[in-house]
Amino acid sequence: MSVFFTVFSSEVRMPIIKVLMYTGRSQQQKDELAKAITDAVEAIAKAPRDQTIVVFQEVVREHYYVGGRRA
């Protein structure tokens, strides 16, 4: 799983968190993960929760390569 955190500027406090992960997680797991990420961003980065965006991008394992070899 990779997490990318983007904030457009110091004035705009709308973080976009992109979670790149293998397929196979349930909707409930993604819901819980999105809530936990939002909670952490609100607490640590002081970003407004209603402006925090979490996006899940799921990729099949066969499309991941590490060191030039399929993961």
Image: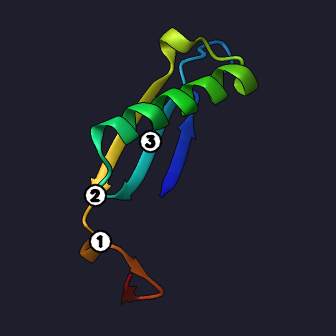
Q: Are marks 1 and 2 in contact (CB under 8 Å)?
A: yes
Three-letter code, disc 3: Lys
Q: Position of residue 26 (x, y in %)?
A: 29, 45
Asked whether the beta carbons under mark 2 and mark 3 sit within 8 Å of each other, the answer is no
For the residues marked 1 and 2, what is the alpha-carbon distance in whole angstroms? 7 Å
- Look at 65% across and 20% down and name the residue there: 42
Q: Which numbered disc flags the more N-terminal residue, 1 or 3?
A: 3
Residue 71 in the image: x percent, y percent?
Answer: 38, 81
Per the image, the residue denoted by label 3 is 18
Which class describes the residues within 10 Å of circle 3: few (<14), some (14-19), or many (20+)? some
Give the residue type that dot 1 points to. Arg
Q: How is the image coloured?
A: rainbow
**Within-10-Å neighbours for mark 2: few <14, some 14–19, many 20+:** few
Kindly state the secondary structure of the residue where label 1 is placed.
Answer: helix
| Residue 6 in the figure: left or right of residue 59 | right
Where is 51 relative to 3, above or below?
A: above
Q: CA distance from mark 2 to mark 3?
A: 15 Å
Q: Is residue 26 above or below residue 48?
A: below
Q: Which mark is residue 34?
A: none
Query: Which dot marks residue 23?
Result: 2
